[in-house]
Amino acid sequence: MSCGKCNKTTVEELKKTHKLLAEFDYEPVKVEKGYANRTLYVNVSDNKIELKPVSEELKEKFIGGRGFGLWYLWQAVTPETKWNDPENEIIISSGPIGGITQYPGTGKSYVVSLSPLTNIPIDSNVGGYFGPFLKFSGFDALEIQGKAENDVIIFIDGDNHKITIEEAPEECVDSHILAEQLTEMYADSEEGKKNVSVVSAGSAAEHTRIGMLNFSYYDVRRKKVKLKQAGRGGIGTVFRDKKIKALVIKFSNLKGDSNNPADFDTIAKTGIKLHKEIHDFDDLQNSMRKTGTTYLVSIMNDYDLLPTCNFQFGNHPEAHKISSKVFKNYFNITKTDGCWYGCTLACAKSVDVFKLKTGPYKGQKVIVDGPEYETIAGVGSNCGIFDPEAVLECNFYCDTYGVDTISFGTLCAFVMECYERGIINKETTGGLELKFGNWKAQLELLHQMARGEGFGKIAGQGIKRMKEIFAKDYGADINFLNDIGMEAKGLEFAEYMPKESLAQQGGFGLTNKGPQHDEAWLIFMDMVNKQLPTFEDKAEALHYFPMFRTWFSLVGLCKLPWNDIVPEDNAETDEPHKIPEHVQNYVDLFTAVTGKKITKEDLILQSERVYNFQRVFNIRMGKGRRKHDDIPYRAVGPVTVEEYESRQERYDKQLKEEVGINPEGMTTEEKIKVLREYREKRYEKLKDAVYKRRGWTMDGVPKLETLKRLGIDYPEVVEIIKQYLD
Amino acid sequence: MIEVNGEHIPWKEGMTIQDVLETCRYTYPMVIIKVNGKIIKRAQYETYKVKDGDVVQVIHLMSGG
Ligand code: SF4
C-alpha cells in the first residue's frame, strides 16, 4: 500500500532510503515478577541511547505505567519547559501486570508527556502490543527526548537485542499506510507480522494540538494491521514535533509466562473465573463481545446523557440511527477482537471493508477500527450528525491523520454552535458551512487539519485557543464562549452530559489531566440511583473511584473488564458498584505477579501516591490549584433559554425545592440566573468537600501531612507546595 | 403510588418490575433491583408484582468507556 506521494512502491525500496543514525546493542534480561528492572532512554537530538536501572524505591512508590511516566517526566522538565521544547519527553510504559495473557484486559500501555493543549502532564492509555513487547524486549519504560532534524524511526529489535535510529524520509505519515508498511518491513515473514507493533501519528498531528498516537497489532485472522489509540491530550503532536515518524518493536518469543510471575497458578485460576463470567453473562449484560462500547449510545440517549449539539441537550430523536443496532451490522464480529492476547471481552470491533467517500483516499476500501462510543457521540450526536457512514468516515480519517476523536468531536461541536449563532461565518471558515449535521463540512475541516491549511488549522488549536481567537479577531463575547466552550485545563470534554450530576461535574473538573471520564464516572450513582445525597458522599466517591481507576494505569490494565461485566452474585455484596470480586481479583493478580502481598486498601494507597504526585506536578507547571478545577457553565447547568426550556420541569422543580424560589411568573432568563448562582455555589462546595477528603488545602494543594503519609515528601516535591501552604 | 429511586410513580394493579423499568425508561441492563430492601432476581422481573406503597431501588452499576 502507498499513499501515492512518493514513487517507492515496495517496502524494500522504502527501506533502502533509510539512513542509519545510531545503533545500540544491549544485553538481554529475563523479566522477573513483572519487571525487566531496566528502562530505555532515547534522545533523538543527539541520537543517544542508554539504559537506566529501575530501583526498588521506584517500583514501590510509582509501580509502573503512568507512575513511571510521571517520574521520568518530572526529572526531564523544569517549570519553564513547554510541550515543544526538546526537553519534553514521551514515555511509554505498561506496568507489572501488563503482558500476562491469562486475564482479560492486560495489555495496556500508558503514555505520558507534557500536553500541547494543557501544558501539564497528560496520560493516555492504549491497547495494541507495543507496551508488553517493550517489557519482554527488556524495558519497563521507553523515554524519548529531544528533537530530530529529519523524520526518524526508532526500531527496537527485541529478538536480536538491538536498537536503531534510522532516518526514514519516504514513508507516508498517515497511520493506516505507515503501520502496514512498517509491519511488513520489519517482520521476518508473513507469519512473523504478529510479532511487530508500530506506534505512529499522522499528518494532522503535525498541524494541530490534538494529535494522538496509534499503537498497532497484527490481526492474524483478518490479515490486517489494526490500530488502537492513545487519544487524549495531543501526544501525537509532540511525537511529530520531535520528527518521529514511528516507533517499531519486534518481539517473537511471547509465551504465556513471559512476565515470569511469582505465582502462575493463581493468575491462571483468576483468569478462568473471569473468562467464564464473560462467557456466561456478557450477552445478558453489556454485550461487549458483539457491539463493543457502541451499546452506550442508546443507553446514554435514554437517560438524557448523550451530548447533542455541543452538550446543549442530552438526547435526540435520531440517535437510533447511530446506535449499536446499526453498527452491529457493519461489524465483522470475531471471538478474537481483543487488543491484547487473552481478552475474551473482545470489544475492539472493526468495520473490515469500508469505502471512503472523501479526502485523499477517496474510493479506497479500508478497515475502520471502531467506532467506539466516545467517537460516535463526539463526531456524531454532539455535532448533530446521525449518519453512521459519516461517523465511520470521520473515525477512519481521525485515526489515520493521528487526531483524537474526542477532542475533534468536542471542538467541532463548539465550532458548529459558534457558526449557528453567527459568532463565525462562511467568511471566517473559508467557505465551510459548519452547521450542526453537516458531515461534509466536518470532514473537510478534518482534511484541512491534515493539510495544515484554512480554518482547520485554527480549529486544530483546540477550544481554549479558539475562544481567544474568536474574541480577539471576531469580536465575540468571551464570557459566552467560556460558558459554551467545553474544555477545562485546555482539554476538551469527553462525551457525557454532566449537567444534572454534580458528582460527575467533579468527575470532570476535579481531575489531574482535564475532563476525561477515566477518573470517575458517577452519573448513575449520583443522578439516577441517588446514592450520593450529601457533599461528603460525593467527595467519598470522588476520592475512591479516581484512586481505584488510577491503579489500572499503574499496572497495565484495561478498565473495561472491571465493571463492564459483573459476577452473578454481585448484587448480594455490600458494595456492588465497586464489583468487590473483581477488586479482589486485582489484588490477587498483583500479588501473584510481583510476589508482594497487598490488600485492597494498599491498592488505593498505591494510586494515591501517584495521583498526589501528579497534582504537585501540575502545580509545578503553574496549574493544579483551585481555580484550575473550574469547568464551563454548560457542564454545570443551562446556559441558554433553549437549554433551560428543554428541561424546564426539572429546573423549575430544583428552584422550588432546593433554592426555595417560586419560578412562576419569572422569565426564563431570570430563572437561568438564579439557578446558575445556586449551581455554581454547589460546585464550589463540592470542591471544598473533595479537597478535604483528598487531604488537600482549600486551594487544592496536597498538604504536607498528605505527602508524608504517602511517603512522597521528597525535598523537590515539598519545595513546590511549600509556597502555597501558608 | 410507589417510590422508585426517590421519585413517586403512580402504581397500577398488576404492575411488575418490568413495568416499573419501562415506566421510568430504565433501559440499562446492569441493574440491581431491590423492593423494600429485598433483592429481586432478573428472572423474576416479568412476574414479580409490586404493591402500592412499595419502595423500589433500581441501582444502576456504573459504566463508561
Ligand atoms: S476490553 Fe476491549 S479495550 Fe479492554 S483489553 Fe479487552 S479488547 Fe482491549
Image (cartoon, coloured by chain):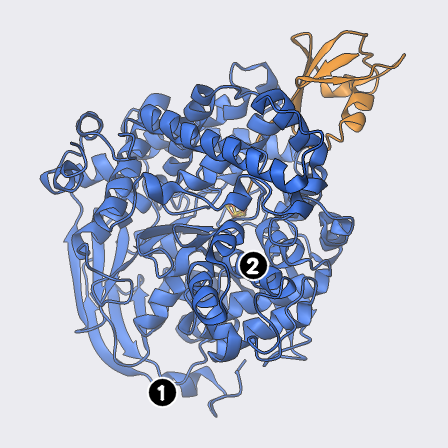
Chain colours: A blue, B orange
* Front-lying residue, A452 or A500: A500
Q: Comparing marks 2 and 1, which lies closer to the viewer?
A: 2
Task: State the image coordinates of residue A312 (x, y, percent, origin top left).
Answer: 63, 48
**In terms of depth relative to the viewer, which is nearer, A9 or A437?**
A437
- Hey, which residue is sitting farthest right in the picture? B13
Q: Report which quarter residue B2 is drawn in.
A: top right
Answer few, some or many: residues within 10 Å of disc 1's Cα (few below 14, many 20 plus, some between 14 and 19): few
Q: Nearer the viewer, residue B16 or A571?
A: B16
State if disc 1 and disc 2 touch (CB < 8 Å).
no
Q: Amino acid at mark 2?
A: Phe
Output the chain of dot 1.
A
Front in this rendered view, residue B22 or A187: B22
Quadrant for the N terminus of chain A in the image: bottom right
As drawn, A705 above or below A317:
above
Image point (34%, 67%), residue name:
A239
For the C terminus of chain A, give its image quadrant.
Answer: top left
The residue at 45%/82% (across/down) is A11
Residue B12 shown left or right of residue A240 in the figure? right
Asked if the residue at label 1 sits under 8 Å from ligand 1, the reply is: no
> Does the closest atom of ligand 1 sit within 8 Å of the Cβ of label 2?
no
Residue at 30% x, 70% y is A154
Q: Which residue is mark 1?
A: A16
Mark 2–mark 1 distance (CA, rounded to whole Å): 46 Å
Tally of numbered tags? 2
Which dot marks residue A414?
A: 2
Q: Residue furthest front?
A: A665
For residue A179, say whether it is visible. Answer: no
Q: Earlier in the sequence, mark 2 or mark 1?
A: 1
Question: What is the secondary structure assignment of the residue under circle 1?
Answer: helix
For badge 1, the amino acid type reads Lys
